[in-house]
Every structure is written in structure tokens, then in C-alpha cells.
Amino acid sequence: MPRVSDSKKKRKPHRGKRNAETAERKTAKWVESGGLERVLAKIESTTGIKTLPEYPDHFLSHRGRAQVTATLAKHFPDLTLDQLYLEREEEKLLYPTPSLHQLDPMHPPYLAARYHNVLKVPAQMALLNAWHALNALNVKYPKPEPQRSKASPALHLGIWETYRLIPIVTTDSRNQPAEVIPAMDFFLSIIGKLIAPRLRTILRREFPCQYSRQQRAYERVLILLDSDLKARPALDFGGAFFTVAAKEGSSEILHLDFNDERHSISWVVPLGDWTGGEFCLPQLGVKIPLRPGQVLVVMTKNLVHCTAPITNGKRIVLTLFCDQYLLKHGDEFLNVPVIDYSP
Ligand SMILES: [Fe+2]
């Protein structure tokens, strides 16, 4: 039997125990051997950055479905999803905002971006299990939205303010049989613990203006919905987003999300095992595959979008967003001047 002291001797020293001098020497050696260049080359080879010739503003002033249909017919006649360029599956994808619009301080730096490996497999499994456990109960679903999807309705959970003066807990979160609420809160608490912190980090680092606006909206929500959030802390996503639209299947009809704000972004998180279901953006000329663990962020009020049909398997999709009234009233609440950019 080896003595304890012997086994301790064999163990490699922990990286953290290395003294400053050794760390500095090893870092210098790594830099000298081209380590930094190798890392940068790796990032470049696994990041697809797409430059756009011009700002895709076809739908900026649109108010309703009829206008969208007319503009689609004018600018994208005979459009089929086969015409769109199919992006690669694996890499990080960025669609930077064309430079002129980057001068607008409120505008996100990217029109769309796909992040890779955001959700690990255990997190995906936990979410799917909680979703199935919730749907094994008698959940009340709203009517399907025929303007977006031919079949599956979505549950809108969390907080929103659509066309109101103050935020509320959504009807789908409240108007449910008593046994549904704990299962719903369990599902939402997993989203809050495993997705929200990661998206908040991306938001803070890559979308600082959107992060600040959402934090202002969040401070207001914390004040106005204090008792609701104390009673149901699972509805609190820390300002990373406020509403979760959850459904099985996809929105196969080209549409804009009119409840979003012009400068806001939405997150799309797919879950399950499926083929097909690419996210289609005709103004960018692309369809973006979404695989388990990936997250897409996109300006869903500026860019008309739909999802290609799921050809095999089942997919649950979570759309995580902050509606326009939460953002606008959040700005006003703290006396931040609201700039009206509407055309
Ligand atoms: Fe949408």
C-alpha cells in the first residue's frame, strides 16, 4: 500500500499553485512558439463573418401582415427557400450591421449571430425532460397563430407588457390548472439557471446597448412586479429576456415579430433531435441551420423570417425576448430620453 505522502508526491502540481515566475516563463514560451497566432487562427477558422453590401431595410416602416405580403411580392418575387444559401452547421456565425447603421448608438452590432456550444447536453436534457413533464399535464394553450404557423401554438411564459402601461405576468403563465403551475415554474427555473446567465454574458459583451436598455427595463419590472416575482421567482430571468415563447415545431410562414422593438433582439434556442428547421432570412439570402446546443440571436422586427420544415424528428423551440413596451417604458421610467427612429 502506498503511503499517503507517496501518492501526494505523484500528483501533478495544480496549475493555480504555479508561482508567478514560472507562469510568466511558460506564457512567454507559449507566445514565442506562436500560441497566440494559433488561437487567433482557430477563432477565425471557426467564425464565419458575413459582410453585407447594404442595410436590409425592406420592412422598417411596416405595420401589418398585408404590407409585409406586398413587400415580399415586390422585392422577393417567386421566393422559395431553395434559393437561399445554406450556411455551415458548426461554426460561430456573425452578420455585422453595415457600417452606416453602426453610427446609430441604439443599433445592435449584429443583425443576426449564431453562437455554438452555448447549451451543454445535460442542460438540453434537463430542459426537454421538464418540458415533457409540463406537457404531460393539462396545460392550457392559446389558439394557434395562423400568421406564423400552420399548426402548433406557442405558450408565452414570463412577463410582458404588449400594448399596456405596466408589465404583467402573461396569461399563459397564470391561467392554468393548479397542478400545472409548479411544473411550469420548474421548467422556467431551468431556463433561468442554465440559459439566462449565458445569454446575459453574451448580451453584455457583444450587445452593450441592448444590455443596458434591458437592465433598465428589468429594474422597473423588479419594482412594479415585486410581489409577483417574490411569489414566483422562476419568472425572473435577470433581465437577459422577459418572455419565453415555447412550442413544438416551427413558424413556417414568413413574418415579422411586430411586438418587438426596432432595435431589440430575440434569442432562438432549439431543443430535441431533428433534421431540417433552418432559420430562413431572405433579406440576408441565407438559411441558417440550428443544431442542439446552439443559440441564434436575430433582429426579428427588421428581418422577415421563417423556419424551414422539420423533415425528421421532433424539435422544441424557445424564443426568448423583451417586448417593445417593456423597453420603451423602461427608458422613460428612468428619464432616459427616448429617441424616435421610426421612419
Ligand atoms: Fe418570429
Image: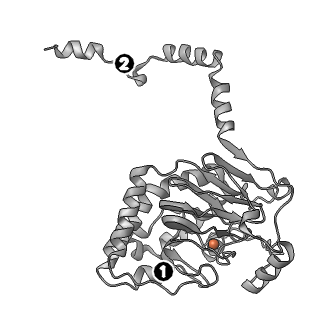
Could you tell me residue 105's position as x and y percent? Answer: 76, 58
| Residue positioned 68% across, 69% down in the render | 300
Q: Residue at x 41, y 54 (%)?
A: 123
Please tell me in which quarter of the rendered image ligand 1 is found: bottom right
Residue 283, position as x, y percentages in the image: 78, 65
Tag 1: amino acid: Thr
Label 2: element kind = loop
Q: Is residue 234 left or right of residue 46?
A: left
- Tag 2 residue: 13
- Is residue 240 at all visible to an observer of this figure? no
Instruction: Choose the circle earlier in sequence order: 2 or 1.
Output: 2
- Where residue 170 is drawn, which disc sits there? 1
Residue 78 position, x and y percent, is 81, 74
Would you place residue 170 above or below residue 129 in this image? below
Q: Camera-side residue: 44 or 289?
A: 289
Figure quadrant of the C terminus: bottom right
Q: Which amino acid lies under the numbered mark 2 shown in the image of this protein?
A: Pro
- Residue at 83% across, 61% down: 55
Instruction: Mark yes or no: residue 133 visible.
Output: yes
